[in-house]
Image: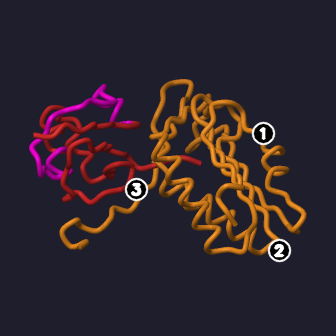
Chain colours: A orange, B red
Amino acid sequence: MSIDVDKIALVREPIDGAALEQFVRAGKDGAMVAFDGFVRNESHGRATSYLEYEAYEPMAMGKMKEIVAQIHEKFRIDRVAMVHRLGRLEIGESSVYIAVSAPHRGAAFDACRYAIDTLKKTVPIWKKEYFADGAVWADGELPPTPPSAKSAS
Amino acid sequence: MVRVKVLFFGRLRELIGLAEEVPELPEGATLAQVFDKYAERFPKLAGFRGSLVVSRNQEFAAWDAQVSAGDEIAFLPPVSGG
């Protein structure tokens, strides 16, 4: 249940998903669910050449750790591996990989889904899509703004 | 005056050609006022006020939060990781 047994990272090399899946498996577990997000060959009908990801790295690590802490609190899971890649990625390469182990499958499915959905809404990482004839920053999601500082106290 | 670090990311960084600087700001300035100051200097930024969030010391912050010496403030476009 401790965050010390989890693996949370931002990397610039290819992600080894099989190693992450192995990492989260323990004797007391009976299930593991993994999400592998990888680069699609098109975006809104245009053929993608490659992607580039950038992050506000210390804040992104902080937000990823928060998500992992949240899923430990919400679901009966064991270990988590959450890795996001930065820099240039080619078609088919994994950009994000999340593996969750648990004694039973339901919690692993639910926690993995919650983790990727929350990551996409709250972790400060940005994707730029490159095409044969130009590049665009992907439409993203605006994280929620906290309430006014004046009314917060 | 207080010295803070200001960071721009993604399309904002690209738009103004500035990733980071360490300006001096009036004590008690709000994050909205900090943004307005940059929007005066880089008019192209102004239209983005409604489609970005701001963070202070690596936590999302309210626009009326005030800056303190040594703060790290970042202007963040909609996130698109994953």
The residue singled out by tag 3 in the image is A142
Q: Position of residue A131 (x, y in %)?
A: 55, 29
Residue shown at 16% from the left, 52% from the top: B30
Question: Callout 1 environment at 10 Å: few (<14), some (14 to 19), or many (20+)?
Answer: few
Q: Nearer the viewer, residue A127 or A15?
A: A15
Residue type, label 3: Leu
Mark 3 falls on what kind of element? loop
The residue singled out by tag 1 in the image is A16
Question: Callout 3 environment at 10 Å: few (<14), some (14 to 19), or many (20+)?
Answer: some
Residue type, label 1: Asp
Q: Nearer the viewer, residue B76 or B43?
A: B76
Please give the chain letter of the residue carrying mark 3.
A
Residue interval drawn in magenta: B11-34
Q: Which mark sits nearer the N-terminus, 1 or 2?
A: 1
What whole-number distance in Å separates the C-alpha atoms at marks 3 and 2?
A: 34 Å
Q: Nearer the viewer, residue B17 or A45?
A: B17
Question: Callout 2 environment at 10 Å: few (<14), some (14 to 19), or many (20+)?
Answer: some
Quadrant for the N terminus of chain A, please.
Answer: bottom right
The residue singled out by tag 2 in the image is A104
Quadrant for the C terminus of chain A, please.
Answer: bottom left
Residue shown at 21% from the left, 73% from the top: A151
Residue type, label 2: His
Please give the chain letter of the residue carrying mark 2.
A
Q: Is residue B13 magenta?
A: yes
Q: Comparing marks 3 and 2, which lies closer to the viewer?
A: 2
